[in-house]
Amino acid sequence: MKIISNDVSLVVQGAITSVTKAVLDGLRAVFPGAELILSTWEGSALDGLSYDKVVLSPDPGPQVADEVAHLENNVNRQLVTTASGVRAATRPYILKTRTDIFINNAKFLKYFGQYDQEAPYIFRNRVLICSYYTRNPRVMNICFHPSDWVLFGNAEDLKLYYDSTALQTENEAEWFKTHDKTKVLFTNFLSRFTPEQYIFISFIRRFRRLSIDCYYDFDPVILGQTEELYAKCFVVLDYQAQLDISFTKYDPNRYLEKHTTIAYWQWKALYQHYCQKRRNALWGMYCFYGFAWRCASRIRTLGIRILNCLGVKETMKYFLMQIRKP
C-alpha cells in the first residue's frame, strides 16, 4: 500500500517543549504536503512554530502516579490533546506523535497494510506502533500494554481509538490508596492501570469483555487475549530500526527494559500463530525467549524488592539514569 504525504494528517500532541519547533520543522521535511496539526494547551507560546492547524484545549492537569518517586500520570492529558487533534484531521491517514519525538524518516510507512491480508480486528487496517513500551506479557506480567508514543493508521481507525475514551477518574488514578496490592510490581504505582493499558483496555471493552482487574492482573486467558489483540490490531515496529524515531524525554531503555518489550520479530511470531494459525520455529523461539527472560526478570524483580526494602531503590534508579546519559 503506497502512502503519499499529501494523504497524511500529522497530529502532534502534548505540551510545547524546547524541541517542539525542531520536531515540527522535521515533520515538514519528512512529510512534505501533509496536514500538520498541533494539539496543545490553551495559553501555550506558539510564536515561531510551523503548523497548518492548531487546536488549543484546557489542560485537565496531571494525576498522581507515584508519590514516592514524584511521578505524574498524564493519561488524561494525552487523551484530551490526541482526541482533539484527530477530530481536526481531514486526510485519509493519521500519524499521531508527540511534541518531543523526532521522526527521522517515513520508511516505516511501507509496513502499513502489509499484513492486512489476514483481517484486522475492529480496525480497517492494522495500526503501526512502536516496540517501546509494547510489553511482552510472557516476560513481564503486564498485559494489554501497547505503546502510545507514535501511531500510524487509517484516519477512521485512529479517531475510533481515541475519540470516545472517557478520562480516567481520580478513583482509578489513586486505586491502590483504597485497594490492597497483592503483587510487588511497580511498587509505589497508585493507578489501577498504566496509561497505555487504560487507553487500550477502555477501547477494547467497547467491543468485547476483558477480565483484567488491575495493571498486574495475569492469567493464561489474559495472556492469550493480549497476544491475539497485538497480532490482530497492530504491527509492532522496532524503535530506531523499522520505526526511526528519537524520543527526547528520556532514554527508553534507561532501566535496561528492552527485553520486556515486543520486538518486530516477536510480533511476527504472534501474527503467524494467531492470524495465520501457523506453528513454526519462530513461535518456538518466541516462547523460549519469553520463558528465559521471565526467569531473568524474576531475579531482577527480587533485586528491586531488596533495594526497596533497604530504602535505596530510587537512588539506584537515579544512578542508572546518570551513567546511561550520553
Image (cartoon, rainbow, N blue to C red):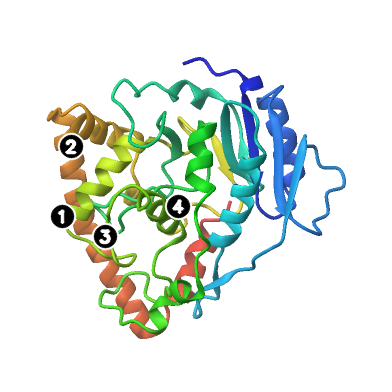
Q: Are marks 2 and 3 in contact (CB under 8 Å)?
A: no
Q: On the image, numbered disc 4 is attached to which residue?
A: 253
Q: CA distance from mark 4 to mark 1?
A: 27 Å
Q: Nearer the viewer, residue 214 or 311?
A: 214
Question: Residue 84 in the image: x percent, y percent?
Answer: 64, 48
Q: Residue at x 34, y 24 (%)?
A: 115
Q: CA distance from mark 3 to mark 4?
A: 18 Å
Badge 2 or badge 3: first in the primary sequence: 3
Q: Are marks 4 and 1 in contact (CB under 8 Å)?
A: no
Q: Residue at x 12, y 30 (%)?
A: 279
Q: Residue at x 14, y 36 (%)?
A: 284
Badge 2 or badge 1: first in the primary sequence: 1
Q: Are marks 2 and 4 in contact (CB under 8 Å)?
A: no
Q: Residues within 10 Å of mark 4 (few under 14, many from 20)?
A: few
Q: On the image, numbered disc 2 is attached to which residue?
A: 285
Question: Residue 186 in the image: x percent, y percent?
Answer: 37, 70
The kind of secondary structure element at disc 3 is: loop
Q: Are marks 1 and 3 in contact (CB under 8 Å)?
A: no
Mark 4 or 1: the one toward you? 1
Q: On the image, numbered disc 3 is attached to which residue?
A: 141
Question: Residue 241 in the image: x percent, y percent?
Answer: 46, 32
Mark 3 or 4: the one toward you? 3
Q: Residue at x 26, y 74 (%)?
A: 183
Q: CA distance from mark 2 to mark 1?
A: 19 Å
Q: Residues within 10 Å of mark 3 (few under 14, many from 20)?
A: some
Q: Amino acid at mark 3?
A: Asn
Q: Which mark is residue 220?
A: 1
Q: Amino acid at mark 4?
A: Asn
Q: CA distance from mark 1 to mark 3?
A: 11 Å
Mark 2 or 1: the one toward you? 1
